[in-house]
Amino acid sequence: MYFDVWSKGLAELAVECIAVGVFDEPELTPEARALDHSAGGRIAATVARGDFTGRSGETLLLTDVTGLAASRVLLVGLGPRKSFARKAWRRGCTSAVHALARTRIRTAALAIERPGAKELDDYYFARNLAELAASALYRVNDLKTGKKAPTPLLERIIAGPVRAAGVETARRGFAHGRAVGLAMSVQRDLANLPANICTPKYLAERARALAKQYRTVRVQVLDQAAIRREKMGCLLAVAQGSAQPPRFLVLDYRGGKTQPAGKPAAPIVLIGKGITFDTGGISLKDPPAMDEMKYDMSGAAAVLAALTFAAEARLPLRVVGLIATCENMPGGGAVKPGDIVTSASGQTVEILNTDAEGRLVLADALQYARRFEPAAVVDIATLTGACVIALGAHHSGVMASDEALARELVAAGLRTDDRAWQLPLTEEYAEQLKSNFADFANIGGREGGAITAAAFLSKFAQGLKWAHLDIAGTAYQGGAQKGSTGRPTPLVTDFLVQRADRG
């Protein structure tokens, strides 16, 4: 997909279709009025007849329009003017791209009024538009054998209005938004695959393919023997009930400057939970919706997506991705409630519930991250149902040992409409993890379950600038709309961009 800003008058744009906004009073936006003047009043007449109400998300394609270089005009409803803000703008843009995708249109101009600069500056206007277009055009990588729906032909979008002084900023936003869209597709494709295809070995193959595609990315794959040499007892314990051997993936994107001695700069380390299927182990989950546990590797998919973005956008930053991946199965050799294992840090853990496995594999990954002397560490995981109860599907949960890092992530979520909410992480929660037989247990009871999971991870993150993103409620949808959402890739990529801009 190619994106750019339009600079000519709308009537002169050499595209197949022009999309303009209409409020629900009904009221034409300034761009719609300008286009209507050239089109001989056809837009105003359509609205006056009541054929188009301007309701939020509504669209109507007008064909054989005269007086314009374009032959078609797409009317896009923006809802009430008095409440028009980013959410309504995003819905309008998404509806426009969906409508265009249902046609054979290849080139289009979007002249949909945007909120004020304080809500949406030139960079985020362009970046969000490119992300929304990519998401709207995404097609699930299903394995159906029937006839597929035709691939949308839309290949070029020019958008505005953008002031002359903001054109280059907008073009940077388009470039980043396009890279985010690509990264989100990587995440969604991986997460949507069934667990009999997307195994730990498959994730390793995808990591190697990423390194082949981008010379700036290096990949190291640790097999079961190498994992054992690293003394990752927690990861091995989770994996021991499965016939699928575990893998530990190390991806190193080096786009940043080196220090005077030639040593790479301190990286941002992203850690992804890669449980390719989670039955709960011996603490077996209830059958309803267990098929959705193929999405328990969404954190790993998000890390691969983030490295894809960094390489595609050529960020001047070093980013290391660590992925601990295995299955959690109730086999004859599976770890049992009450078993005690030794983590890579040397600390012992009493496993009271084998369905609290994600924190175990992340614990060993956090210890591994120390060797990079990171500037910051962020783990990403579909970790707890408790986070879904607390925040629903609207916000990811953020907990951190470093307040500044937590604020960075929350701010990135606000800028990209991929929102997160910070939960407390005070020492009282760690009290719930006490064990009579080991350094601590892997669960702390029902109360504050999302926070006690983070408190467990904090035991392995001491001394690090560390934050935890619980994406259990945001990474995928269930039910009739089942599928990966691509979150938190917009948030994480914006965090990386801001870090890169800071130098």
Image (cartoon, rainbow, N blue to C red):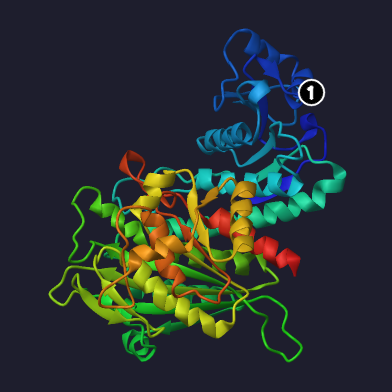
Outermost residue toward the right?
165
Badge 1 amino acid: Ala
Residue 405 screen position, x and y as percent: 61, 63
Outermost residue toward the left?
332
Front position in the image: 359 or 349? 349
Front position in the image: 429 or 32? 429
Q: Is residue 215 above or below residue 133?
A: below
Front position in the image: 309 or 366? 366
Q: Is residue 74 above or below residue 349?
A: above
Instruction: Assign the C terminus to one quadrant of the image.
Output: bottom right
At x 74%, y 64%, the residue is 501
At x 75%, y 44%, the residue is 121
Outermost residue toward the top?
49
* Total numbered circles: 1
At x 73%, y 79%, the residue is 257
* Left or right of 72, for residue 421: left
Q: Residues within 10 Å of mark 1 (few under 14, many from 20)?
A: some
Q: Is residue 137 above or below residue 470?
A: above
Tell me if I can see residue 339 in this picture.
Answer: yes
Q: Please, what secondary structure does the residue beneath circle 1 have?
A: helix
Residue 79 screen position, x and y as percent: 60, 23
Specify the quadrant of the image occupied by residue 471: bottom left
Residue 53 screen position, x and y as percent: 58, 16
Residue 149 screen position, x and y as percent: 40, 43
Write down the residue under mark 1.
Answer: 34
Tell me if I can see residue 240 in this picture.
Answer: no
